[in-house]
Amino acid sequence: MGQIITQVDAFTNKPFAGNPAAVCVLPTPESDRWMQNVALEMNLSETAFLVKQDDGFNLRWFTPTVEVPLCGHATLASAHVLWSEGHLSPDEVARFYTKSGVLIAVKQGEWIELDFPVNHSQPIAVPEELSQALGVTCKSVVQNSLGYLVELESEDLVRQLQPNFQQLKSLPVADVIVTSITQADSEYDFVSRFFAPGLGINEDPVTGAAHCCLAAYWRDRLGKDEFLAYQASSRGGVVKVRYPGGDRVYLAGQAVTVMRGELYN
């Protein structure tokens, strides 16, 4: 029998929304080249590979072009697969050993909460070309290890944005989170989008790692610790964000399996 691979839509409770990720629970480790080839074949923003360890799972994430050090939606998808396919019982904690340290996932009813490292942003000198590449005036720009974090004047500007991806790729940092507070009658606290042409993904549908940056950014500005966030890509997705301070942030989302297949080597 070939290697089972499962496709999961993360940060959503319905198929064909949220952010799709492929998940492989491997019986033994595979080479980096093999994993990169599988990720390219799947052609999703992320493919996750897990190998059982004594008290958890080694976890790595690959885009179609590169390995990345942290991915929220593929971690959520991985936890969903571990519980839904019987690798863990629902009351067991999912523990992942990754290039970003140990990550924890806990099942909370229909939601899965992830324990991730917070990603603080720093003030920078704003590249003149950034506004040109985004096609909009930036209200505020800071930078973190994921890329630029740009606040815009309104939710409508975030939703309507159409960046020039070739111009973005020419910037010193090619990956950009854009965000704003929501309109007064919204159920959400803030909206965002994430453009990552530097990672081979023009727009990521829903990005857990971006919310590790957004949590600290909006906590400082809104003076609260818990948020309901919406990533306003064409697929869209909902993230519960809890950041009480310190070096950890808690992201919660839902996930659904949409496809299960078999890889032949």
Image (tube, rainbow, N blue to C red):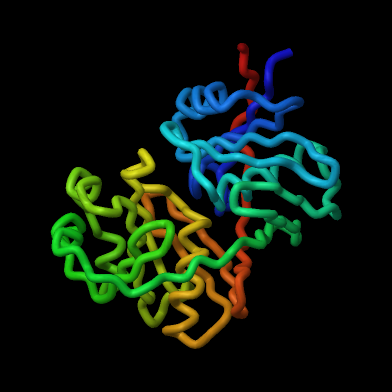
Tell me the residue at 62%/79% (across/down).
244
Q: Is residue 27 above or below residue 19?
A: above
Front residue of this view, candidates 72 and 145:
145
Position of 141 compared to 25: left or right? left
Q: Is residue 63 above or below residue 215?
A: above
Front residue of this view, candidates 49 and 247:
247
The residue sitting at the bottom extreme is 223
**Which quadrant does the N terminus fall into?**
top right
Q: Position of residue 99 (x, y in %)?
A: 60, 47
Q: Position of residue 161 (x, y in %)?
A: 24, 58
Q: Position of residue 187 (x, y in %)?
A: 48, 74
Tell me the residue at 18%/55% (across/down).
133
Q: Position of residue 152 (x, y in %)?
A: 27, 71
Tell me the residue at 52%/60% (across/down).
238
Q: Is residue 249 above or below residue 99?
A: below
Tell me the residue at 61%/12% (across/down).
265
Position of 198 compared to 21: left or right? left
Badge count: 0
Front residue of this view, candidates 42 and 141:
141
